[in-house]
Image (cartoon, rainbow, N blue to C red):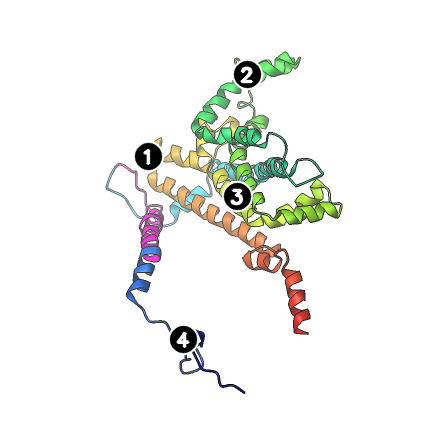
Amino acid sequence: MKDTIPTAKTASRRPEPAARGGRPRRRKLTFDRVTFFLAFLGVPLAIFVIFVLIPFGQAIFWAMTDWRGFSPDYNFVGLDNFTKMFQDDVFLKALRNVALLAVFVPLVTLTLALGVAVAITLGGPGKGPVRGIRGASFYRIVSFFPYVVPAIIVGLIWAQMYDPNAGLLNGVLTGLGLDRFDTFAWLGEKTTAMPAVMFVIIWGLVGFYAVLFIAAIKGVPAELYEAARIDGAGRLRTTVSITLPAIRDSVQTAYIYLGIAALDAFVYVQAMVPNGGPDNSTLTISQRLFNVAFAKQQFGYATAMGVVLAVVTLVFAALVFLVNRLTGGGEGESRRKAPGSGARRAAAEGGAG
């Protein structure tokens, strides 16, 4: 039996000596490690504290005052602004409106965006390599175009299209023989104002999330789709069983961003119905905040509304994460269900046996 002579290569593989108690020793803080943490952790953390946490703390303070915005004088009123807010029927109506936006806008937008993305990337012929429909690049550009236009321009354009007297929408419907839409006020009727606003928001955002999902689907291994096609799975089955689980994290992120945009929706709504619509049917919290601050000069009360809107946004994001976790999402679950992990595990067990 030959004696093994340790070399520099084998010596480098030896584990580091353990500290007392069986735990590995801590690495020394070298100059490189300190500068790395300062550059990539300290600077972003400082920026977050200065521009996010401190302003949020200041907002909470001003929300407990009767500050009028244009004077250094103010009185501390405690939670009176919050009590007044939840007794304000107009604010509660705005809260219900943004809740509707947060439910329907992300759901419809992501459904349409996913449909467009699947059609563009996987909607091609049923035989041969998996590919998208013919002219996919053209459809990708067309779907993304509304997102390139600024939101305020989109709102103003659609406000003109919804015009009851000279709007393009009523003109087209009347030309098709629907005379009841001759002077129909889409933004002036309580039953149609909110759906009309939702349509514009969805139209303006669906292209961006379609492109986002296209990029996510491109990252799914083509072998999975080819195997599903061999097993006889149709396009719908493939989308539900392969595409959606594979891009689940992208869908979650998109839902959070869309929910935040819907909870605000100030630009779109202010451009189309700046007065809040009939019976405040389209009024949002940000619109109510803006009017209270600059029209009534009650900045302390308006700041309290902003704090509530921030809390609602955080709760919404937390709920999305919670639902995703309860339904089997998360990075850890994705790793456990990664394609081929079961086969690799079975092979390893067979080799060990």
The residue singled out by tag 4 in the image is 8
Label 3 and label 1: CA atoms lie apart by: 36 Å
Which badge, 4 or 2, is on the more N-terminal residue?
A: 4
Of residues 178 and 93, the one nearer the viewer is: 178
Residue in the picture at 46% in, 23% down: 156
Relative to residue 33, is residue 141 drawn left or right?
Answer: right
Label 4 and label 2: CA atoms lie apart by: 79 Å
Judge depth for marks 2 and 3 and give the one in front: 3
Relative to residue 267, is residue 341 drawn left or right?
Answer: right
Label 2 and label 1: CA atoms lie apart by: 39 Å
Mark 4: amino acid: Ala
Which badge, 1 or 4, is on the more N-terminal residue?
A: 4
Judge depth for marks 3 and 1 and give the one in front: 3
Categorize mark 4 by other alpha carbons within 10 Å: few (<14), some (14-19), many (20+).
few
Expressed as whole percent of the image width and height from the top left, the position of residue 168 reads: 55, 16
Mark 1: amino acid: Gln
Mark 3: amino acid: Ala
Q: Secondary structure at mark 3?
A: helix
Label 1 and label 4: CA atoms lie apart by: 75 Å
* Dominant SS in magenta: helix
Label 2 and label 3: CA atoms lie apart by: 32 Å
The residue singled out by tag 3 in the image is 254
Q: Secondary structure at mark 4?
A: helix
The residue singled out by tag 2 in the image is 168
Which badge, 2 or 3, is on the more N-terminal residue?
A: 2
Label 3 and label 4: CA atoms lie apart by: 51 Å
Of residues 310 and 142, the one nearer the viewer is: 142
* Magenta part of the chain: 41-70
